[in-house]
Image (cartoon, rainbow, N blue to C red):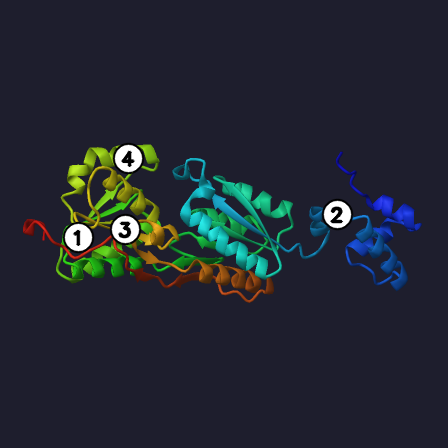
Amino acid sequence: MEQERVRIADIAEELGVSTATVSNVIHGKTQKISAETVRRVEMLLEKRQYIPSMAGILLAQNASKIIGVAINRHDKYEHHVLQDPFISESLDCLEREITAQHCFMMVKCTPDPAEIVRFGSMWNMEGMIVLGFCGEDYEMLRAKMHIPFVVYDGYAARVENYCNLSVDDFSGGYQMGEYLWKLGHRKILFLADNDICMDHQRYCGLCAALQKAGCAAPEHAEIPLRRAARLAYYEANLPSILQYTAVFAASDAYAIELMNFLTDHGVQVPQQISVAGFDGIPESAVVRPALTTIRQDGGVRAHLALALLRQEKAGTAQYGTSLLPVGLQIGSSTAPLRGNPAQK
């Protein structure tokens, strides 16, 4: 039989003190309580294994120690947003950093930015980290939400009144373009589910590198958001895809998905076609062949996000976009061009 939970009233009655005294000891408000009474209350709390209502304690304090993480539940995640490799790695990095700051992480997934305002207010949060929304959403949050927040993975043309952490997407695309060019690839396909924001910047970087080398701009293929539709797209367009010598996907998840599809259809990577991605998620190193990718450092981003939240709370933050560097991580999914000279 489950043991009945011990209440503050039970502790107070046993010791012959008021419930307010017990509550004040639990919350650390002991300035007006004798040391002996504090000792007696603490000993009995431990003996009775009293479990406080953490939510009540945090909400009663001026500093709740709660850091909220709000994630856009976009249709592309197909109701599995936390299983997305980039999202899960980001949460892992944030959780380690938030714990190191002696705080608690609370996660909210929603497609509605208005819910973020209610989420932050309801829990008296120290600050919030927001992933995956749009520029106008961040402006709305700044106007309606008075707790500090940092945009962790977003794109906005102008950032004037909040802190935006973004990786240098253009540089990442440029580095991949240079690398594929050096391998001899001239017919390159860029795969993404849109042509805006971060993915557009990655494509522009790829184009800039190839055009600097005297090569025509690579093709841009916009693939469906939903996995079943993407697989049908690959099936219908496999002959066209194989006209290219290399594919650069806007994310590692898409690159790995394509590699698996190609392997299932008897296409050898990289012998017949090279494949590369963007993000540097852990799966990129363990998939076979290991994926060539543009790596971003999630640990650095999480550390900076918490630092910016502290600066915002102190009123010392400088609003704007911080571009974090990215780097080429070479795997075995890309190789020097060989085979049909007509493809060069």
Amino acid tagged 4: Leu
Residue 251 in view of the camera: no
Residue nearest the observer in this picture, 126 or 344 = 344
What's the mark number on residue 51?
A: 2
Callout 3 secondary element: loop
Instruction: Estimate the x, y position of residue 128 in percent, counting from the top left.
Output: 55, 53
Residue at the outermost front position? 1
What's the mark number on residue 217?
A: 1
Residue 254 figure quarter = top left
Q: Do the residues bearing badges 4 and 3 touch, measured as CB atoms within 8 Å?
A: no
- N-terminal-most mark, 1 or 4: 1
Camera-near label (3 vs 2) is 3
Callout 4 secondary element: helix
Could you classify mark 2 by the number of other residues whose Cα lies within 10 Å: few (under 14), some (14-19), or many (20 or more)? few
Position of 80 with respect to 119 (left or right) is left
Q: Which residue is mark 4?
A: 231
- N-terminal-most mark, 1 or 2: 2
Camera-near label (1 vs 2) is 2
Quadrant, the N terminus: top right
Could you classify mark 1 by the number of other residues whose Cα lies within 10 Å: few (under 14), some (14-19), or many (20 or more)? some
Residue nearest the observer in this picture, 295 or 44 = 44
Q: Do the residues bearing badges 3 and 1 touch, measured as CB atoms within 8 Å?
A: no
Q: Do the residues bearing badges 1 and 2 touch, measured as CB atoms within 8 Å?
A: no
Q: Is residue 325 above or below residue 235?
A: below
- N-terminal-most mark, 3 or 1: 1
Amino acid tagged 1: Ala
Callout 1 secondary element: loop
Q: Residue at x 32, y 57 (%)?
A: 294
